[in-house]
C-alpha cells in the first residue's frame, strides 16, 4: 500500500459521513470508454461530432443517426462493476458512505450493490415512450432495428439520459446537494471536473476532508487534502472496510 493510499485508508477509518462523487474514470476499468481521454468517445470519427449527436436537437431531428451512435458506443450492457464500485457498495453497507453522486449512466454502482445513488446524467437502463410514457429496459433498445418505437402507441422511445441542451433533474440535484452538504468527507474520483453544472455541486461540501483520485490533474487539486494520481479501481482495491 502506497503512502497516499494508506492516508486515504486513515481518512475513511476516521469519518462516518462519506460521499463519493465520480465520473467516467470510475467505469473505464470495467471496459466503458470515457469521453475526453485519448481513446474516449470525443476522439472517435463519425459523420458528426459526438457532442452534436448526443444533443437533444439532434435526437429530435435525426433519431436514426442518434440511435446508431448510441447503441454502438453508449448502450454498453456486457460489463461488470470493478473494485471501486464494489468497495463503495461495501462502505455504504457498513454505514460509512451516505451516497454516491455519479455522472455516469451505466448503472454499475447499483449493480455492485449501492442503494443511495444520484445519477446526475440519467441511466441507460431506463427508457420511456415520449408519447405514452411506457417503460422499456435497455435490452429492448439494444435489440430494436433502427429507431425504437413503442409497441403500444408507436411513439418514439427516448433513453432517460441527459443529453446536451437538456437540464439536470431537479430532484436528483437536490438529493445530491443534501448529501454533499452533510458529508464530513468528500471523495472525488475518475472525473476531470470540467462538466458543469455537475462539477459545481462539489462547492456545497463544507466538511473536513476533500480527497481527489484521478489519473490526471484537475482544477480542484490545490483545494484537496489528499490527491492520488492513480487508477481509482487499483486504489480502492487496496482499501479495507
Image: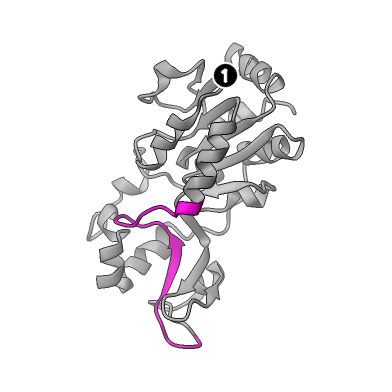
Relative to 29, is 11 on the left or the right?
right
Relative to 14, is 105 on the left or the right?
left
**Residue at the image point whose x is 53% and y is 53% from the top:** 106
Which percent across, then down, holds residue 144? 47, 77
Determine whether 104 is above or below 76 in the image: above
Residue 29 visible in rendering:
no
Q: Which residues are magenta?
A: 151-171
**Residue at the image point whose x is 33% and y is 66% from the top:** 66
Predominant secondary structure, magenta span: loop
Q: Nearer the viewer, residue 174 or 116?
A: 174
Which percent across, then down, holds residue 117? 59, 47
Which percent across, then down, holds residue 191? 44, 35
Is 60 a magenta residue?
A: no
Is 153 a magenta residue?
A: yes
Q: Tell me, what colour scheme is on the image?
A: one colour
Residue 134 visible in rendering:
yes
Determine whether 29 is above or below 161 in the image: above
Read off the residue under disc 1.
Answer: 208
Q: Nearer the viewer, residue 200 or 128?
A: 200
Relative to 125, is 195 on the left or the right?
left
Secondary structure of the residue carrying numbered label 1: loop
Q: Nearer the viewer, residue 17 or 94?
A: 17
Amino acid at each position: 500500500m502506497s503512502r497516499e493510499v494508506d492516508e486515504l485508508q486513515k481518512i475513511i477509518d476516521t469519518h462516518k459521513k462519506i460521499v463519493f462523487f465520480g465520473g467516467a474514470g470510475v467505469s473505464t476499468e470495467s471496459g466503458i470508454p470515457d469521453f475526453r481521454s485519448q481513446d474516449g468517445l470525443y476522439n472517435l470519427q463519425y459523420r458528426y461530432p459526438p457532442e452534436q449527436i448526443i444533443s437533444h436537437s439532434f435526437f429530435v431531428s435525426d433519431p436514426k443517426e442518434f440511435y446508431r451512435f448510441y447503441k454502438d458506443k453508449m448502450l454498453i450492457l456486457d460489463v461488470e462493476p470493478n473494485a471501486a464500485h464494489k468497495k463503495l457498495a461495501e462502505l455504504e453497507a457498513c454505514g460509512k458512505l451516505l451516497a454516491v453522486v455519479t455522472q455516469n449512466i451505466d448503472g454499475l454502482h447499483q449493480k455492485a450493490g449501492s442503494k443511495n445513488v444520484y445519477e446526475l446524467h440519467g441511466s441507460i437502463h431506463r427508457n420511456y415512450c415520449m408519447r405514452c410514457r411506457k417503460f422499456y429496459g435497455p435490452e429492448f433498445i439494444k435489440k430494436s432495428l433502427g429507431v425504437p418505437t413503442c409497441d403500444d402507441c408507436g411513439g418514439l422511445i427516448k433513453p432517460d439520459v441527459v443529453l446536451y441542451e437538456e437540464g439536470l433533474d431537479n430532484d436528483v440535484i437536490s438529493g445530491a446537494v443534501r448529501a454533499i452538504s452533510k458529508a464530513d468527507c468528500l471523495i472525488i474520483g475518475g472525473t476531470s471536473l470540467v462538466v458543469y453544472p455537475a462539477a459545481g455541486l462539489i462547492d456545497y461540501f463544507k466538511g473536513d476532508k476533500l480527497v481527489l483520485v484521478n489519473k490526471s490533474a484537475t482544477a480542484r487539486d490545490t483545494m484537496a487534502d489528499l490527491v492520488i494520481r492513480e487508477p481509482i479501481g487499483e486504489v480502492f482495491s487496496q482499501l479495507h472496510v
